[in-house]
Amino acid sequence: MEYIGYFASILIGVALGLIGGGGSILTVPVLVYLFAVEPVLATAYSLFIVGLTSAVGTVGYFKKGLVNIKTAIVFGIPSIIAVFTTRAYIVPAIPKEIFSTGSFTLTKDLFLMLLFAVIMVIASYTMIKKDKKNTIEETGEQKFNYPLILIEGAIVGIITGLVGAGGGFLIIPALVILSKLPMKEAVGTSLVIIAAKSLIGFFGEGGESIIDWKFLFIISAFAIIGIFIGTAISKKIDGNKLKPAFGWFVLVMGIYIITKELFLK
């Protein structure tokens, strides 16, 4: 099972490099189901893996001038504050057993996995649907919708802190629509935001679990290999054409997690 997990870790990076967002949604299921990592710890590990992989992925975008620093700061600051606060205070405050009714008990682990599955279903919809706005190349002076950007940045940060996903499926459309960035620049800027908030969120961890650094760096290394592969493939294949197919895969995974956690245990 470990070898399958290592292969899946490469696919996380491939997806990030190829479609720019949504790849990190695979990280927690890979850690939980293929490496038997506890869900709460898996969300923390995911932050580190996604953050480090995204940071490596930003190098190529910086070289091409496809990172908008001003946008990254405006969107990133509320997101970073939210993810740090969530990991440091909110996640540790969630009780081990949230509530019980009859033979059913909603535990912290179950709650996080179900929340993650719901996020996967939402993410799959954003990848499957055809959004003409995402293909429009905006020109002219950039204008910020500050209230919406700040609110969405904070929401994405909270989601990232809770479930460990980078949130690229939410960030990229927001940057295109709210910040009027061209698609390729939105992808590069999104990776910078994901890298910063994920790594800061990880180091804001409340100290609930002992970190296996060796394991963490091994999985991160495979994911980084994947992002180089994905970036290389993206030069020959338009990642946007593959996004709907990946979206269907994420939808199936989300439904599988809900079914497994509620009915197959």
Image: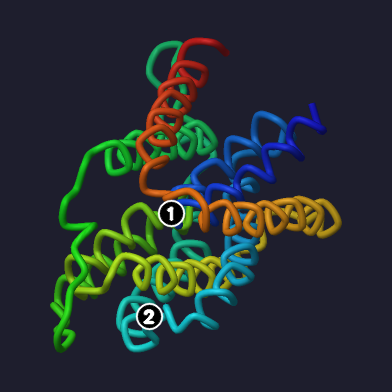
Residue at the image point whose x is 49% and y is 35% from the top: 113
- Is 65 situated left or right of 121 in this image? right
Q: Is residue 29 above or below residue 230?
A: above
Q: Earlier in the sequence, mark 1 or mark 2?
A: 1
Q: Is residue 4 above or below residue 240?
A: above
Q: Quadrant of the N terminus?
A: top right
- Is 57 situated left or right of 138 in this image? right
Residue 139 quadrant: bottom left
The residue at which mark 1 appears reads as 21
Residue at the image point whose x is 31% and y is 65% from the top: 183
Q: Quadrant of the C terminus?
A: top right
- Is 4 situated left or right of 154 in this image? right
Q: Amino acid at mark 1?
A: Gly
> For the residues marked 1 and 2, what is the alpha-carbon distance in whole angstroms?
15 Å
The residue at which mark 2 appears reads as 72
Q: Amino acid at mark 2?
A: Ala
- Judging from the image, what secondary structure is the residue with disc 2 in? helix
Q: Are marks 1 and 2 in contact (CB under 8 Å)?
A: no
- Nearest to the observer: residue 95 or residue 195: 195
Q: Is residue 64 above or below residue 206?
A: below
- Nearest to the observer: residue 236 or residue 200: 236
Mark 2 nearby-residue class (10 Å; few <14, some 14–19, many ≥20): many
x and y percentages locating residue 34 in the rendered image:
71, 30
- Judging from the image, what secondary structure is the residue with disc 1 in? loop
x and y percentages locating residue 145 in the rendered image:
13, 77
